Amino acid sequence: MSDLEKPIVVEQVYQASVDAVWAAITEVDQMRQWYFEIEAFQPELGFQTEFDVQVEDRNFPHVWKVTEVIPSQKIAYNWNYRGYPGDSFVTFELSEEGAGTKLKLTHEVTESFPQDIPEFKRESGVAGWNYFICERLKEFLEKGTV
């Protein structure tokens, strides 16, 4: 993902309340069921967490730091990978949509990631966010399982 590219934006409407979606994206026990196997997460300004994701023979140490919180409306965090160049911000915004909830995810790169690593290419980011937001989270919220 490059800072020269437009942000990745993924939107999805869930047949779930704003409170249910907020809990799914901010409560660590729920996040582990559809997102990543993280040890800790708090929707609090300045909270930082790190966790590793292994892909084949490469390790990607994720580093997140919460930069904005408006309960039940918006959470944003700085997202980078320890040991790799690059920096970005991910924002989750919630709004009521009929009887459900609309989530708008924006992933904005502020410093380019290495383009010679497949996991850092824009196509990988788009596919990953569509998988997490439009499949995993949707199944978790609407069926209770993933």
Image (tube, helix red, strand yellow):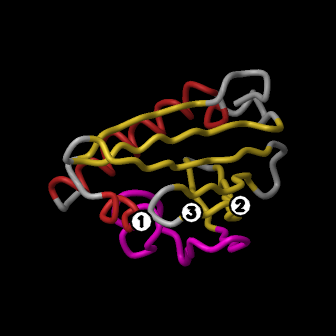
| Residue 121 as seen in the image, left or right of residue 36 | right
Picture layout, residue 94 above or below residue 52:
above
List x then y, in percent, for residue 90: 62, 47
Q: Is residue 108 magenta?
A: no
Which residue sits at x=42%, y=65%? 31
| Residue range (magenta) | 25-50
Q: Kindly identify which residue carries mark 1.
A: 31
Identified at 81% across, 42% down, the residue is 86
Q: Is residue 27 magenta?
A: yes
**Residue matched to label 3:** 70
Position of the C terminus by quadrant: bottom left
Question: Within 10 Å of the Cα at label 2, are there few (<14), some (14-19), or many (20+) other Cα atoms?
Answer: some
Q: Relative to 118, say whether 93 is above or below.
A: below
Which residue occupies 15% across, 55% down?
143
Instruction: Check disc 2 and give the amino acid type.
Output: Thr
Quadrant (top left/top right/bottom left/bottom right) for the N terminus: top right
Q: Is residue 115 above or below residue 51?
A: above
Inspect the image, locate mark 1, and give the three-letter code of the amino acid beneath it.
Answer: Met
Instruction: Say which label, 1 or 3, has the lower sequence index.
Output: 1
Q: Nearer the viewer, residue 75 or 81?
A: 75
Compare marks 2 and 1 and give the one earlier in the sequence. 1
Please indicate whether residue 75 sits to the left or right of residue 102 in the image: right
- Which residue corresponds to mark 2? 67
